[in-house]
Structure formats: C-alpha cells, structure tokens
Amino acid sequence: MAFNSFHFLVFFPAVVLIYYIIPVKLRTLWLLGASYYFYMSWNASYGLLILFSTVVTYFGGRIIGALSDAKKKKAVLILTFLVNLGILFVFKYLDMTIDLVNVILSPMGIKRVSSPFSLILPVGISFYTFQALSYAADVYRNETEPEKNFINYALFVSFFPQLVAGPIERSKKLLSNIKKVSLERNFSYEKLSEGFMLMTWGMFQKMVIADRISFFVDGVFGNPQAVGFVEGVFGAIAFAIQIYCDFSGYSNIAVGAGRIMGFDLMENFNTPYFAGSIAEFWRRWHISLSLWFRDYVYIPLGGNRKGRVVKYRNILITFLLSGLWHGADLSFVVWGGIHGLYQIAGDLLKPVKEKTAKLLKVNTEAFSHRLLRIFTTFTLTCFAWVFFRASSVKEALVYFKHMITRFDPWSLFDESLFTFGLDRREVGILMAALIILVIVDIYRYMAQKDIGRFMGAENLWFRWIVYIALMVACVVYGEYGVDFDSAQFIYFRF
C-alpha cells in the first residue's frame, strides 16, 4: 500500500479516526493490527517475516537484559544479529553472491551455480531489520531497558508510517512514545495541522516533482549511448532532484502521519543540497541511516580514536557497507566507496584549503564562498549519483564516456532535450514546481523549521490556501493514471 494510492487515502483516515475514538489502552493493539495490514497488503507472507524478526529480537533483548555475564550477553547479541542479517542476506544478497561465485568459477570451467530459491525482496526489509537490531544493540549497551510488553515492541518494529522506508527510529525514543500514547488522550489540533501539512507537502514532492522528472531520468539513463555532455549533466541533476523529492517526500508523509497520531518521528532530511561539504551532506541526507552507521559500525570499529589511518579505514568500510545496504549490486558499493573517498579527501585537504584561503585572503564567511562550496558539493554528489542510478558500473562508465566524447552545447537550443520524456508543457510545470521547492528549502535552511511547524504557526486562512493549492496541484499535475506506475517510492526496494 503506497502512500500515494487510493487505498492509503481510505486506510489512513480510518485508522486515525478509530485511533482517537477507542480507549487509549487499546491504541497500541489497534495500531499493531493496522501496521500488519498495511505491510501485508503488498504480500501476506511478509507478515510472517517481520513477525519472525520481531520475535527473535524481542527475546534476544529480554535474554540480554536478564544475563549478567558479559560474554554470554555478547554471544546472544551476535546470535541475534546473525539470525536477522542471515534473513536479510538470503532475500537481498544471495543472488548477488551466487553471481559473484559464478564469475569466479566460470574461467575454471566449473558448472554454474544456480539459486535454490526464487525470492522476491520484501518491501522495506532493510529498514525494519536495522531498526530491530539497533534495539538489541542498545539493550546490550544498557542504553535502553528490555521491553517486556510484546505488543509495544512489535509496534516499534512495524509502525506503519515509517515501516517500509524509514526513518529508522531508535528504541528509546519510539518505545517511550508508544507507551505514552497508550496512557493519555493526546489529540492536538496543532499536531494535526502540522502533520497534515507535512503529508500534503510530501505528496507534492512525490507526485508533482519526483514522478514527473522520472520520465526524463528514465529517458536519459535508459539509453546512455545517446547521451552527450548536456544530456548527461541534466540527467545527473534530474536524478539528484528525483531521488531527493521521492525519498524526502516519503519521509515527510511518514513524519506527518506519525505527528497526526501524536508520534514524534525524527527528521530524515534537512536541505541536503545546501550542504557545503560531503561530510555536511551526510549530516543532512537520510539522517537516520547515517546515524545508524555512525553508532553501530563506525564507532564500534574505533571511529577516529586510533589514529588517522584507522579512521580513514573505518570511514571507507562504513560507506562501502552503506552502499551495499542500498542494493545488491556493485554499482551501489562503488557509490558508497566514492562517498567514503570524498570524506577522506575532504579531511586530508582541509589544512591545504585553510592555508590557501588565508594566503589568497579569501573571506570564508562570505556568501560567495558558501555558494561555491555548495556548488562543488552538489557537483560531486551528482557525479556519484550516476553510479547509484545506472543499472551497472559498466553502464555508468558508458554514461560518462559519452558525456566526455560528445560535447553537444547545441542541445540547449535545438529542443532535443524534449525528446527524453518531457515535452515543453511538462518541463514548464516541473520548473514551476521546482521554484516552489527551492523557496521552501531556503526557508527550511534559514529558519531551521520544517514546513509543518511553519504552517502550523500561520493564520487559518493562509494555511487553507496552501493546503488547497498543494492538493489541487497533486490532483491536476500529479503523475498518475492508467499508463503510469507510481506505486513504489525509490527507497521501497532497499
């Protein structure tokens, strides 16, 4: 059940209405049932998978909390991780591993290995697996108490607004939130207004911008041999916009849906394309995943505590694993590796940049310098996005090869860009929507307040003008219909 489906348009108001009518003690049970229905609407068997993961980590946490011997606690934690990551491996990485084995064995004349299973990747499995594992790790670290109430814990793992694409919540925060809503009537018109605004804005990002620009992205990346310099540059920028609006749109809908019901889900995006460095970009992009890898991979590896060489090793390992988390393909690993190398290069070059700026008397506090840094970071990010979007590393290299060898500035004037999926009218609609996006993000960047809280503080008449305008834009200019498949957000497949 995608957020931008008619099914969800009926499901969500019904869930919220009953949620606020029934006795507060029944709320968690109601939300748990609604969450499993939401998840099983894709495939009924998915319910068994998430239930198994929930049971394993629930009892893993209880056992870890009951043990006093450090070695035994660690053994239970490792077993809990191995079981859950084993499930993730089978569904997501088994085919990739078999292909790799075949590549190695083929030159030796050994018969190809075939997969014993024919499995479909369950929606959002990487997200809820990481969320459940973070709970087990937090219990082991004594950062959270083992949850005794199985219903509360099951809801923590499966809470439907953030189940299939995050944000990846921490147990201490979300579990306490779950307990709180089951003890008091927490209806707030202010939260309702803020949540509705976030959901509406997220729908606009997804349906009007991301789904529209996807036609151009698919046209460019679907035929990399036809790409010239201009098409290549616009294609990379277009995908950067698409994936931002698609994933940020989902996160806004998720956070907004949670806020309507009194849940304070974490912000997952904070104007990432206004970042002045790659390190800052990762503090603003997919924040919940960045923090997860920092806390459960980078720091346990030693972080920056054991010297510069070990620090760089840890950065590279973390980003390679982050790339692998995104998909079972070498192109994702390369994408992660590029960002790891960006981080290392940025750290190595920092003293050089500071000395050069001082020597040339560059005002590093000036707007022009900040703008240059933002432009440079965005360019580096777009370069890496090509590997993320391409179907393989080979296709990404073909993409760059044609960009470099086919310089075609005339494409800006001969209207050939309109042959990649968007005609003049659609480009006009897209540009108008992007202007709105930039205005909202500039405000978000300067005020450090999301659009939900901004609109919640405005007068009623103004709020409703914005609500209606965004809803009309989604209905009139949103991409949907018989010939359009808008069922999946990009990050659903991760």
Image (spheres, grey):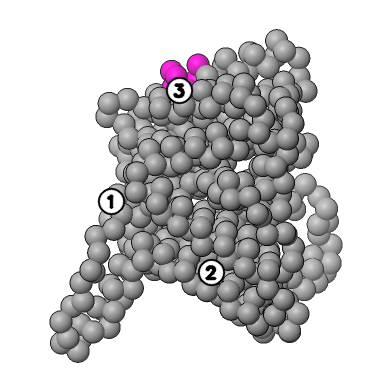
Is residue 66 visible in the rendered structure shown here?
yes
CA gap between label 1 and label 2 equals 44 Å
As drawn, 396 above or below 455: below
Residue 287 visible in image:
no
Q: Which residue is mark 2?
A: 80
Q: Quadrant of residue 451?
A: top right
Quarter of the image where one finds residue 458: top right
Residue type (three-letter) at the residue carrying disc 1: Asn
Q: What residue sits right under mark 3 in the picture? A: 10
Residue 473: within the magenta?
yes
Q: Secondary structure at mark 2?
A: helix
CA separation in Å, label 3 and label 2: 37 Å
Q: Position of residue 453 (x, y in %)?
A: 73, 30
Circle 2: residue type: Thr
Q: Could you tell which of marks 1 and 2 lies nearer the N-terminus?
A: 2
Quadrant of the frame with the N terminus: top left
User: Disc 3 vs disc 2: which is toward the camera?
Assistant: 2
Where residue 177 appears, as percent x and y from the top left, is: 70, 42
Q: Between residue 462 and residue 51, name the one nearer to us.
A: 51
Above or below 316: residue 385 = above
Is the C-beta separation of discs 1 and 3 under 8 Å?
A: no
* Prevailing secondary structure class for the magenta stretch in the rendered image: helix
Disc 3 residue crowd, few under 14, some 14–19, many 20+, Cα 10 Å: few
Query: Where is mark 1, residue-wise?
Result: 223
Element on which disc 1 rests: loop
Q: Residue at x 52, y 19 (%)?
A: 471
Indicate the position of residue 166 as horizontal and vertical percent values.
55, 48
Q: Position of residue 198 (x, y in %)?
A: 62, 30
First reached walking from the N terminus: tag 3 or tag 2: 3
Between tags 1 and 3, which lies in front?
Answer: 3
Image: magenta residue range? 472-477
Mark 1 or mark 2, which is nearer to you?
2
